[in-house]
Amino acid sequence: MLAAERRDHLLGLLTREGKIVAKDVAADLGISEDSVRRDLRDLAAEGLCQRVYGGALPVSPAVVDYAARQAVTPDGKRKVAAVAAALVPPGGAVILDGGTTALAVARALPRDLACTVITHSPTITAALIDHPKAELYLLGGRIFKHSAVACGAAAVEAAQNVSADLCLLGVTGVHAEAGLTTGDAEEAAMKRALAARAADTYVLASSEKIGTASRFRVLPWSEVSGLITDADPDHETVEAVRALGVEIMAAGG
Amino acid sequence: MLAAERRDHLLGLLTREGKIVAKDVAADLGISEDSVRRDLRDLAAEGLCQRVYGGALPVSPAVVDYAARQAVTPDGKRKVAAVAAALVPPGGAVILDGGTTALAVARALPRDLACTVITHSPTITAALIDHPKAELYLLGGRIFKHSAVACGAAAVEAAQNVSADLCLLGVTGVHAEAGLTTGDAEEAAMKRALAARAADTYVLASSEKIGTASRFRVLPWSEVSGLITDADPDHETVEAVRALGVEIMAAGG
DNA sequence: ACGATACACGCAGAAACGTGCAAGACCAGG
DNA sequence: CCTGGTCTTGCACGTTTCTGCGTGTATCGT
């Protein structure tokens, strides 16, 4: 049995039965209680369960099913997403970019959070259809298949008609000198248009993006309020970006 | 065994069993674990699987049950969808409504068919992202959650900027006197706007819709070119509709 | 307060990992 | 048919990660 699989199993148990007894699970799976405890400790550290004496409980009854769903997204992205989701104020409006990290943010939005999500990603829209309180606004246009988002003139134009408190932007490269970059010019323009419609722009960058640059510039650092990353806060690039006046939000790297 | 073949095998395993254990696969195929790991690394780099210690997991649980979900598409809808998909001419543009039947149409589009699909449904867009040759155009707007499509003024306005050869419309009720109906006024207006932008409008109606009517009128029969249904061609309503000059396309009921 | 249970920590063996390297397969051009 | 180049594959190596056990500590129920 794979370690990751075991973690999923634990989250599954949590949603189905509402609790986990370390001893029982260890006996069921034929592994040591230590392993179960270790897993539970990790999950608790990520906010996916609440550790109690003898086992674990769901962190809150409402979040159980989304926790299970997001269990498969890579660790780094999930951590970044959790921090980003916490930035969305109740009743506020957030512009959410496309990409897997942004998708993780969508999944990390608390089920009891009433907010408006504006996005050009059909994938993210689909993921939030089930969200009980989120109001969704989809920016249409020609779909750029590589990243599964709406791009082009029509999409940029649609973006001009919205405003938000916050823009959460995913990028391909995060580099001190090059700024934020991505691999497609249309996409870069779209991201720029989105960022321009929000009071604050925060960048989602799991650690593998740090220190890399792609062909097309999205934004200079002056336009960015903060960087959310699970990379080491002492990383050269992170330090440099901080020196440029960008708030660094560490996601427990 | 060819490398590409091996990759397919891995992806197959992933969807069938939901996980891959590198060691087991290596033993099964009689190759080294290194090769398996290399393949998994490549697949992960392409976003086709998620690498975990000991093997790999599907990128998202949704991928696993995708096949299962598709299998549960009721027979009727699938037949209707197949007939509808065959109406899309190579190189042509089709406006695709939202709803489960339309989703089935999207899935039924041949992979080698180059066409433009215009839709206000993020779900359908997401389903067609993988389609190798389909050009996608998404109509944005406020998302009406009940049916997961963009509705409202912005969406209708966006629809004014497109034209297509064909509009495939899903409805809730198909009735000889009441015409085509659905349960929400905004949605009805949106469907009307879509139908107005296409040269021909065909209605997708699996048999359970025939003879029923909902609260809001979408279109009168005069605006409809054809009705695609798996219902009995001798059904009273079908006969009546045919008498109104609407082409009936039987989907092998 | 006390025994029982659960816990965290450290350790060591085992398993899985990435990388560099060399042998072989494959392909294209002469 | 040969030759040079590229790509793939398996192996060896050092490294990282996981797992189970022992130990001592904290927490629970009585």
Image (cartoon, coloured by chain):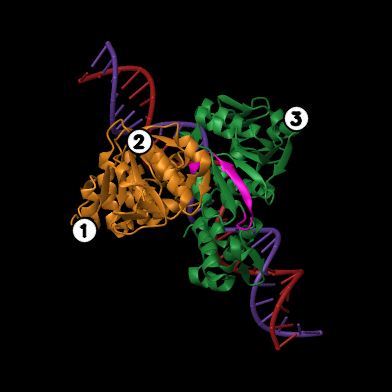
Chain colours: A green, B orange, C purple, D red
Q: Secondary structure at mark 1?
A: loop
> Which quadrant of the view contains residue A66?
bottom right
| Residue A36 spot, x, y in % from top left | 57, 65
Q: Chain of mark 1?
A: B
Which tag, 2 or 1, sits closer to the chain's start? Answer: 2
Give me the disc on residue A244: 3
Residue B234 in the magenta stretch? The answer is: no
Q: Position of residue A20 (x, y in %)?
A: 57, 70
**Measuring 57% from the left and 70% from the top, which residue is drawn there?**
A18
Q: Are marks 3 and 2 in contact (CB under 8 Å)?
A: no
Labels 3 and 2 in the same subunit: no
| Residue B17 seen in the figure | yes
Counting from the top left corner in percent of width and height, residue C14 is at: 50, 57
Q: Nearer the viewer, residue A3 or A11?
A: A11
State whether discs 1 and 3 lie on one chain: no
Please give the label number shown on residue B95.
none
Please determine whether, in this image, residue A88 is positioned above or below residue B199: below
Q: Which residue is mark 2?
A: B198
Q: Marks 3 and 2, Cα distance to the nearest angstrom? A: 53 Å
Let me know if residue A184 appears in the view. Answer: no
Residue stretch in magenta: A110-122
